[in-house]
């Protein structure tokens, strides 16, 4: 074992370039060896708040998808109940369904065709149900195991740096240490989270 591998390096000791080599190329010399890498990566997740940001974004998407599924099914039920009594669609609910991408028409010469269109709406909505199930599974996995390094992580990491740079953060891969970079991510994420909260309030 090399002398460097025994050094307990932390994020404040590692620049961005060295961190990326370890994260995406499995070159661990600059981070105190493979064993110490786990400690460094955990510190990166904790300091940056990436896990919290991903969790919050997932919860927002889950909430919005659940609201959509419930709303669309509610409008479909209203249409079915109204049609059963009046043999024609309930116009206000048609306008609401249109907002969710379902455009229905009514042919007075063939009323049963309208019910078939409602059935097609329900079939199409199964895609939303499947996406919701996938997000719930992803959320449970995130809570249990934390964020994972995936094949998309490198491009996401670079996009994050570029995004921070456009927002005015001064970043140099060779001079900015990971502790400083993590705090940039956390600060920017807090700003985005607050914007999302305000956006949700304005939608209500």
Image: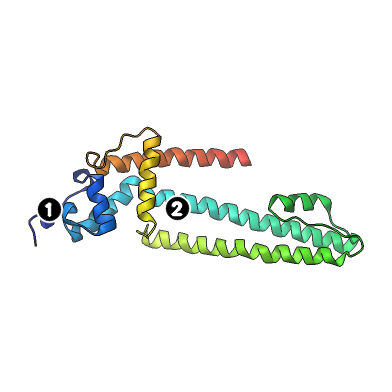
Give the farthest residue toward the top.
Answer: 168
The x and y percentages for residue 176 are 25, 39
Please determine whether, in this image, residue 110 is positioned above or below residue 23.
below
* Element on which disc 1 rests: loop
Quadrant hosting residue 85: bottom right
The x and y percentages for residue 39 are 23, 55
Please determine whether, in this image, residue 199 is positioned above or below residue 29.
above
Q: Which residue is depicted at the point 35% across and 53% down?
A: 154
Q: Which residue is depicted at the point 24% across and 59% down?
A: 26
Q: Nearer the viewer, residue 43 or 3?
A: 3
Q: Quadrant of the N terminus?
A: bottom left
Please determine whether, in this image, residue 125 is positioned above or below residue 48.
below
Quadrant hosting residue 152: bottom left
Residue at which label 1 appears: 7
Give the farthest residue toward the right.
Answer: 109
Residue at which label 2 appears: 55
Q: Quadrant of the C terminus?
A: top right
The x and y percentages for residue 37 are 22, 56
The x and y percentages for residue 102 are 72, 56
């Amino acid at each position: 074992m090399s002398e460097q591998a025994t050094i307990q390096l932390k994020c404040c000791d590692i620049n961005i370039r060295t961190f990326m080599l370890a994260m995406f190329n499995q070159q661990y010399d600059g981070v105190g060896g493979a064993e110490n890498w786990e400690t460094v990566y955990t510190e990166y997740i904790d300091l940056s708040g990436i896990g919290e940001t991903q969790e919050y974004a997932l919860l927002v998407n889950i909430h919005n998808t659940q609201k959509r599924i419930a709303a669309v099914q509610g409008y479909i039920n209203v249409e079915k109940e109204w049609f059963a009594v009046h043999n024609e669609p309930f116009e206000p609910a048609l306008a609401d369904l249109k907002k969710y991408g379902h455009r229905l028409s009514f042919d007075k010469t063939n009323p049963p065709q309208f019910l078939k269109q409602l059935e097609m709406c329900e079939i199409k909505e199964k895609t939303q149900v499947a996406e919701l199930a996938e997000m719930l599974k992803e959320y449970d996995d995130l809570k249990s195991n934390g964020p994972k390094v995936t094949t998309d992580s490198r491009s996401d990491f670079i996009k994050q740096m570029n995004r921070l740079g456009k927002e005015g953060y001064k970043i140099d891969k060779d001079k900015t240490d990971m502790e400083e970079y993590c705090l940039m991510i956390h600060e920017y994420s807090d700003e985005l989270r607050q914007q999302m909260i305000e956006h949700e309030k304005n939608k209500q």
